[in-house]
Image: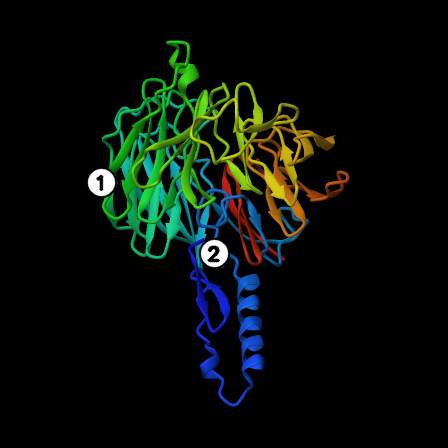
Amino acid sequence: MRPAERRSGIILTSNFPCPVQTTDLPGLPMTLRSLLLLSFVTTSLFAAEPEWNQFRGGRGDGTSKAEGIPTAWSETKNVRWKTEIWGKGWSSPVTWKDRIWLTTATEDGHRLAVMCLDRKTGKILHDKTIFEHEKPQYCHPFNSYASPTPWIEDGRLYITFGALGTACLDSETLRVIWKREDLECNHWRGPGSSVSIYGNLLYLPFDGHDHQFVMAFDKRNGKTVWRKDRNVDYKSDNGDIKKAYGTARVITFKGRTQVIVPGAMATMAYEPNSGKELWRVIHGGMNACIPPLFSDGKLFITTSSPSKLLAVRPDGIGDVTKTHVEWTARTGVPARPSQLLVGDSMFMVDNSGVASCIDTATGKPRWTKRIAGKFTASPVLVGDRIYCFQREMGKSHVFAADPKKYRELATNTLDAGCMASPAVTNGLLILRTKTHLYGIGE
């Protein structure tokens, strides 16, 4: 959040400008005018729900306060529309106003494309191929060539397919503004890192079998602002253990803004504009793909192979492995589905279908429940309900965000399972299954 501004004795953030000033209300006592203005600002703050414009939503944490999202649905119940999506792609849909964007690709990776749909009807408005490759690098059948999630903002859409191409498009016409195809990185199993933007900089990690580095592009023209090699001792020449699929997360703590980028073996924090490394934590593992979460002065970092969750204080300098790790947890930690923070609780659903809740102060479990199935898509929190989606059988589960016990609210079934994480807007849960995009609403 940008620095607050002080107007007429009321603190306003520049993210929520208020068009009403106390001088616009002549004839009322100053105290009453201030109270009315405060009421307006408070209402605006609580009413503002960010667009689901990036992986894990506008807050980057998978949470939404959207209204009108049903608990139960099926192929014949609470489906406003259903649209077939060609190709194979596990990227999440993103939304801006009345439109939805997602990427897809041919299964062989020869054609990489972006699609735009009408949010109200599901009608396809644009379907455009952005990159073509005669001999694309290998992608494991479990993954797709279109797994990274785009980022949308007013007038601009940013998409990436990793080393196979990154581009900025005009979001109205899908005209290509700039594109990059010159970055060498063998993802080994296909791309996975999603777009992250802060100010005018676009951040992407490239943690491949052969090269491991983090890039910052100028989002306006695609030019390189900085590139930083990971410089990690992987203790092996085996490139398989060097790869990761993380997405950057930008946080500000104690006045210091930092870009957190998980990788194989270690997670690093960088100064946003220069790329200077601020600190790193060595945690081991490879294939890290879950974006960090941040709350109450603790950064929650998830590793993979093996799965492990760390709570780290992000105010250190240099190697903070021995000084800033508050706790480590291993039980029930997912390798692919992201977690959800609710107050002082973290809710998780691991790959094998075990749901759990832990205390974020200590990392100790509060409850554990096997709900069956296998999971890859990340769950979302809507109000006080958690929605999670199996990758097979088309099943989804809705349970209460209750730190005391597991309380299932509904089990739903569609024709196909989900690899992609959903998007949420007011009145609509947008689900991407392996074959279709659904608009789920009451």
Mark positioned earlier in the residue sequence (2 or 1) = 2
Which residue is at the far bottom?
A: 27
**Residue 148 in view here:** no
Image point 44% across, 46% down: which residue?
A: 255
Side of 405 relative to 231 (left or right): right
Determine the image quadrant of residue 62.
Answer: top right
- Residue 144 lies, in percent from the top left, at 42, 30
Q: Amino acid at mark 1?
A: Lys
Image point 27% across, 24% down: which residue?
A: 135
| Disc 1: which residue | 223
Q: Amino acid at mark 2?
A: Arg
- Dot 2 and dot 1 residues touching (CB under 8 Å): no
Determine the image quadrant of residue 166.
Answer: top left
Res 119 label: 2
Image point 26% across, 48% down: which residue?
A: 220
**Residue 322 in view here:** yes
Side of 406 relative to 326 (left or right): right
